[in-house]
Amino acid sequence: MGGPVIAFSGKGGAGKTTLAAMVLRRLVGSGVKPVLAVDADPNSTLGLTLGVEVSETVADLRDRMGEAAQKISEIPKQRMMDQWLGEILDEQVGFDLLTMGRPEGPKCYCYVNALLRRYLRELRGSYAAVVVDCEAGMEYLSRLTVDDVDTLVLVAEATPIGLRSAERIAKLADALPVRLKQRVLALNKVVSSGPPPNVRQAAREMSITAMVDVPFDDDLQGRCLRGVGIDADAGRAARGPIEELTRLCTGPTNEQIQQANLKESIS
């Protein structure tokens, strides 16, 4: 079955990739490993944020496999895809990174995508947790990566516009064939005085399981500006909220708690 699947989504600039990297580092640091990190944002910045040099993406292999599918070969296409995908997994200490790359182009990739889905579902079972950095619309998530998400982390800046964007993404997620067990709102770059009262009230009215305030962190901003990766020592000011966010993402979901309570009441 594998460990929990944690997907991060948010509009550009909200800090979703940084928070995904921070949670990944926290998971590994607390002994939850190996972790599979999936960069499902076409911008492909998770590797850069983690300090990993990405040489090839799934999109590159998709094109290569599309050409190979038209040729006769003694090697079964399924085995060929498994081998190629294994080669582009960037193996790091405590985690592996799989970068999806750009979405498919005008060609038909139905056959190749079917191979990808099978491979990724089997791959997930080998990891203690899966962290997915999604594009805001999350369409790539439903097409290729996973169709069962334990926690969707909606990352938003603590502004009315930020919350509106998070609500829009949540509605888009509802329209996709993806099962979401719980949603956590991460208000990011929160100033010392906290979110404005109107933002806090609007956040409480959203359909979410929990909410975490992640403070503005000079170290994280500095690393972003300098192009320095997120390591285990990054973001000391945000350390506590990141630990809370990680706990929420790896603990029992509301659905699991309700099922447990139902079983207990029946017995």
Image (cartoon, rainbow, N blue to C red):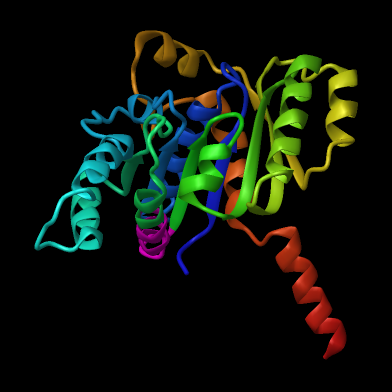
Is 53 situated above or below 171? Answer: above
Relative to 70, is 165 above or below? above
Q: Residue at point 30% right, 41% down?
A: 62
Q: Quadrant of the C terminus?
A: bottom right
**In the foreground, 241 or 230:** 230
Helix, strand or loop: magenta stretch: helix
> Where residue 188 appears, x then y in whole percent?
64, 24
Residue 170, x across and y down, in percent:
73, 37
Q: Taking the image as drawn, is residue 212 in sight?
A: no
Magenta stretch bounds:
116-128
Q: Residue at horizontal 45%, vertical 65%?
A: 2
Is residue 73 toward the left or the right of residue 66 in the image?
left
Location of residue 234 by image quarter: top left
* Residue 120 among those drawn in magenta: yes
Between 150 and 215, the residue placed more toward the observer is: 150
In terms of depth relative to the viewer, which is nearer, 89 or 172?
A: 172
Report if residue 262 lies within the magenta region. Answer: no
What is the x, y in percent for residue 110?
42, 49
Q: Residue furthest top?
A: 225
Residue 41 can be seen in this image? yes
Q: Residue furthest bottom?
A: 267
Q: Residue at point 63% right, 49% down? A: 151
